[in-house]
Image (cartoon, rainbow, N blue to C red):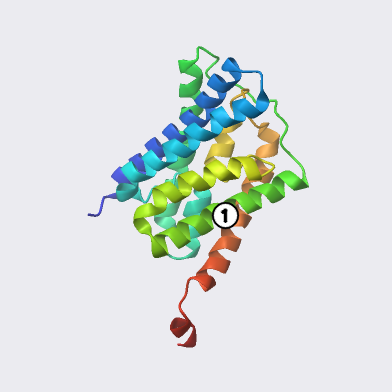
Amino acid sequence: MTFDLPRRLTAEFLGTLLLVCTVVGSGIMAETLTQDVALALLGNTIPTGAILVVLITMLGPISGAHFNPAVTFGFALRGEISISDAMPYVLAQVAGGLLGSVLAHGMFAQDLVQISTTARTGGPQWLAEIVATFGLMATILAGVRFRAEAVPWLVGLYITAAYWFTASTSFANPAVAIARGITDTFSGIRPVDVPPFILAQLVGAWIAVGVFGWLLKPAEEHAE
């Protein structure tokens, strides 16, 4: 089945909205229930990984379930989505992410729009975002190549792991980074720190496309 662009954009909007709503909402819930930062991070991690499995399974057949401008950027580099489609994809993702933060705030009786004061900056954080997004893009490309039906679980499990092995807790998504700039809660990031995160994420996706574009090509195709 193929779906027209308005339906695909709606899927991207809804998917990113629900993803960010889960990230921000579970963070608010976690910091409300415990003062233990490690336990709060765990309470933020598990719902995020779980909702990715659900959203990719549910909306992937409609739009490809990017929910992430870095993923859209990666597929555009590979020629698998046109620039004319990629740009509205990114706009839908960013809009969905922003509304996701607002919706999470509304559910927890907080100010709907906030400005984060949480500093997330510096070389180690940026390197972590390159690594996190490289791994995410690699997981998607290899998953689609070898086990397409497993991609929802692969992505959900990868993000669950990356929350803990990266110094940045694996944003790996420019739309999520932008949306987390307007929440002064557990998952927030100062707006001034967002642009370097986005650049690092795009670099990570670009490297993954190059490396895995070569790695996943059979030898006979190289010889042609």
* In-image side of 139 versus 55 (left or right): right
Position in image of residue 18 (x %, y %): 42, 32
Position in image of residue 91 (x %, y %): 46, 42
Q: Which residue is mark 1?
A: 135
Position in image of residue 47 (x %, y %): 48, 32
Q: Nearer the viewer, residue 176 or 55?
A: 55
Q: Residues within 10 Å of mark 1 (few under 14, many from 20)?
A: many
- Identified by mark 1, the residue type is Gly
- Snapshot quadrant of residue 28: top right
- Residue 104 position (above or below residue 57): above
Helix, strand or loop for disc 1 = helix
Q: Residue at x 42, y 47 (%)?
A: 153
Decide if residue 220 is in sight here. Answer: yes
- Snapshot quadrant of residue 125: top right
Decide if residue 80 is in sight here. Answer: no
Residue extending furthest toward the left: 1
Q: Residue at x 43, y 40 (%)?
A: 52
- Snapshot quadrant of residue 12: top left
**Quarter of the figure with the N terminus:** bottom left
Position in image of residue 41 (x %, y %): 61, 30
**Quarter of the figure with the C terminus:** bottom left
* In-image side of 147 versus 95 (left or right): left
- Residue 167 position (above or below residue 87): above
- Residue 138 position (above or below residue 172): below
